[in-house]
Image (cartoon, rainbow, N blue to C red):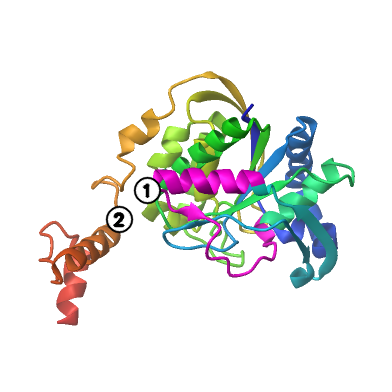
Amino acid sequence: MGIINAVMVPHPPIIIPGVGRGEERKIQATTDAYFEAAGLVAGARPDTIVITTPHGTVYADWFHISPGAGVRGSFAAFGEDTPIAVSYDEEFVRELAGLARSAGFPAGTEGERSPALDHGALVPLYFLGNAYGGAKLPPVVRISISGLSFAEHYRLGMLIKETAEALGRRVSVVASGDLSHYLTRSGPYGYRREGPQYDRQIMEIMGEGSFGSLLEMSESFCRAAGECGHRSFSILAGCFDGVSVKPRRLSYEGSFGVGYGICTFEPGGPAPGRQYLDAMRPDRPTADKEDPYVRLARLTVETYVKTRKKPALPTDLPDEMTQRRAACL
């Protein structure tokens, strides 16, 4: 057993009829695709559903796995108080946390700030509940993204896959995440040219299952695009490490100025997977792709921790950074 399928889905609360109150009809293609993706999961009869979310308990350097026997939540914050309840797969959580601990990987159940279901998990759970016709869902594992690199999120996906295989579980993965928030000037967040560029690229990459390209995207470009799902999608990618994937692009819309993309993935035969990480040096971004501000911050912290002194400024800083430094002197 192991990963039997995965879906990439958005999480706009407005897509829930009790929240959207008719506005959800403006993204009908997304709604239709969501029902199809949820139906794929339900039809495969997974033992466990793993949901990754950008809106749970998020840390810069730690992946939080929700602990406990289960949780309840609702869209009350958005004007809809119908409850949603799920049980957690406690055995899966223990095994995953144990594997992470043995590997020295920063993931576990410690650090919970609020047990409540976030909307990054609630929206997929609404559609999954519909796909199950009101029957009880399989146990869930809810995992939050972190501020660590895309490659480290991919590594977490590998651990999820290893856990599923070790326990003999049939596991479906739901990667929750919106795309760019900067698609239109009339949207709630405004427009940046990186927004439409990011959405075109990510839908092509995920629609083709080109996970190597997913990991190679610049973090600075992704930040400029205002995405929230890239790390969630990177976890999904890691869940297929070592196997080929059969991807399907179901829909893409940006009607409200935020990108909503839905793709599904099923495993194929064996294929090289770790070449993605080997090519990237996953311990940190390569020098030519690392944002210069991040590189300078990392150099400063590492040097101070090791020597208790400030580092000499690199000679290859962009002119903009050099000028800003001079203006501050």
User: Residue 23 at x, y = what percent?
Assistant: 79, 60
Residue 202 seen = no
Q: Is residue 73 left or right of residue 7?
A: right
Disc 2, SS: loop
Which quarter of the figure is the N terminus placed in? Answer: top right
Is 289 on the left or on the right of 125, as rendered?
left
Q: Residue 245: x and y, percent?
A: 56, 25
Q: 288 or 245, which lies in front?
A: 245
> Element at badge 1?
loop
Residue at image coords 50%, 39% = 159
Kindly identify the residue that appears in the image at 67 percent across and 62 percent down.
118
Residue 188 percent coordinates (x, y): 61, 67
Q: Which mark is residue 290?
A: none
Q: Which residue carries the number 2 mark?
A: 291
Asked whether residue 112 is drawn in magenta, I would say: yes
Q: Nearer the viewer, residue 35 or 83?
A: 83
Residue type for callout 2: Asp
List the residue tagged with mark 1. 218
Decide: few, some or many residues near mark 2? Use Cα within 10 Å; few <14, some 14-19, many ≥20. some
Magenta stretch in the rendered image: 91-120
**Which residue appears at 49% of the width and 41% of the height?**
201
Quadrant for the C terminus in the image? bottom left
Earlier along the polypeptide chain: callout 1 or callout 2? 1
- Outermost residue, right side: 134
Q: Are marks 1 and 2 in contact (CB under 8 Å)?
A: yes
Write the residue at 62% across / 57% down.
66
